[in-house]
Image (cartoon, rainbow, N blue to C red):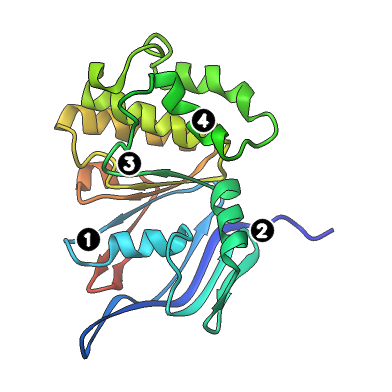
């Protein structure tokens, strides 16, 4: 039996190119990095630096144009070839939890119904047992019967985080999760991500423009013009 992979994600010379008429735009341009299991990494950079494109590629939401991407020891893209869409879908649901700037809560569903929504499509063994613990961990266990419209912005983001956690992901990807929140709520969400990493051992990758939030991570990667400027 092979040893478990030491890295959650390994990227080698990744590029993601878009075309606008005759113009070629490299949103991600020759990026190589390794994300250790159980680490907390933040990705920062100005608007247009490629942060969201990079996290989408690392999270298998978008295919790179070229390069090599390895997920928990398994090659998912190399030499212009990637896994089938069915296998990529399986990787997304088995490995990742996703948090976005927009909460994407269903307004007609209660907090609890929003949190367990992933079970409609797929449920990992034992995932249902996580629900009470996750709700309590995020401090929303007393709000389970409320609708999103009855919650504050910070509470709605907690619900979105809970939804990302209930299927017991190995890697949590957070793309500007505090972009719609004030400073106090942003710092609150940052502390939650830090706690999930330190107490739960979850691998966390955070994209943010907020340097105070980025500083909570063990490692910060700065992008400029699609390339790693500092790491």
Tag 3 residue: 216
Query: Within 10 Å of the Cα at label 3, are there few (<14), some (14-19), or many (20+) other Cα atoms?
Result: some
In the rendered structure, the answer to whether residue 29 lies left or right of residue 172 reads: left
When the figure is inspected, residue 174 is found, relative to residue 60, above or below; the finding is above
In front: 164, or 89?
89
**Name of the residue lying farthest toward the bottom:** 22
Query: Within 10 Å of the Cα at label 4, are there few (<14), some (14-19), or many (20+) other Cα atoms?
Result: few
Tag 1 residue: 45
Label 3–label 4 contact, CB within 8 A: no
Mark 1 vs 3, N-terminal side: 1
When the figure is inspected, residue 117 is found, relative to residue 129, above or below; the finding is below
**Name of the residue lying farthest toward the top:** 142
Mark 1 vs 4, N-terminal side: 1
Residue 58, numbered label: none
When the figure is inspected, residue 51 is found, relative to residue 22, above or below; the finding is above
Cα–Cα span, label 1 and label 3: 16 Å
Mark 1 vs 2, N-terminal side: 2
Tag 4 residue: 199
What residue is at 65 percent from the left and 63 percent from the top?
73
Q: Secondary structure at mark 3?
A: loop
User: Could you say where residue 130 lies in the image, as x and y percent from the top left?
Assistant: 58, 24
Label 1–label 3 contact, CB within 8 A: no
Q: Secondary structure at mark 1?
A: loop
Cα–Cα span, label 1 and label 4: 28 Å
């Amino acid at each position: 039996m092979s040893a478990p992979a030491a890295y959650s994600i390994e990227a080698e010379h990744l590029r993601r190119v878009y075309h606008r008429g005759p113009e070629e735009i490299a949103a991600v341009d020759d990026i190589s990095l390794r994300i250790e299991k159980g680490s907390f990494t933040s990705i920062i950079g100005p608007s247009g630096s490629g942060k969201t494109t990079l996290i989408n590629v690392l999270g298998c939401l978008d295919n790179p144009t070229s390069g090599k991407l390895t997920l928990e020891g398994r090659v998912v893209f190399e030499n212009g070839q990637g896994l089938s869409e069915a296998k990529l879908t399986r990787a997304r649901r088995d490995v990742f939890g996703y948090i976005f700037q927009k909460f994407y809560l269903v307004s007609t569903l209660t907090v609890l119904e929003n949190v367990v929504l992933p079970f409609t499509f797929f449920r990992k063994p034992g995932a249902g047992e996580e629900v009470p613990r996750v709700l309590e961990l995020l401090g929303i266990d007393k709000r389970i019967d409320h609708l999103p419209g009855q919650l504050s912005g910070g509470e709605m983001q907690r619900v979105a985080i809970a939804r990302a956690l209930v299927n017991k992901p190995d890697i949590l990807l957070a793309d500007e999760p505090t972009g719609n929140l004030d400073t106090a709520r942003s710092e609150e969400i940052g502390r939650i991500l830090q706690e999930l990493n330190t107490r739960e051992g979850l691998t966390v990758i955070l994209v943010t423009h907020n340097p105070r939030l980025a500083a909570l991570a063990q490692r910060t990667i700065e992008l400029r013009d699609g390339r790693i400027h500092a790491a």
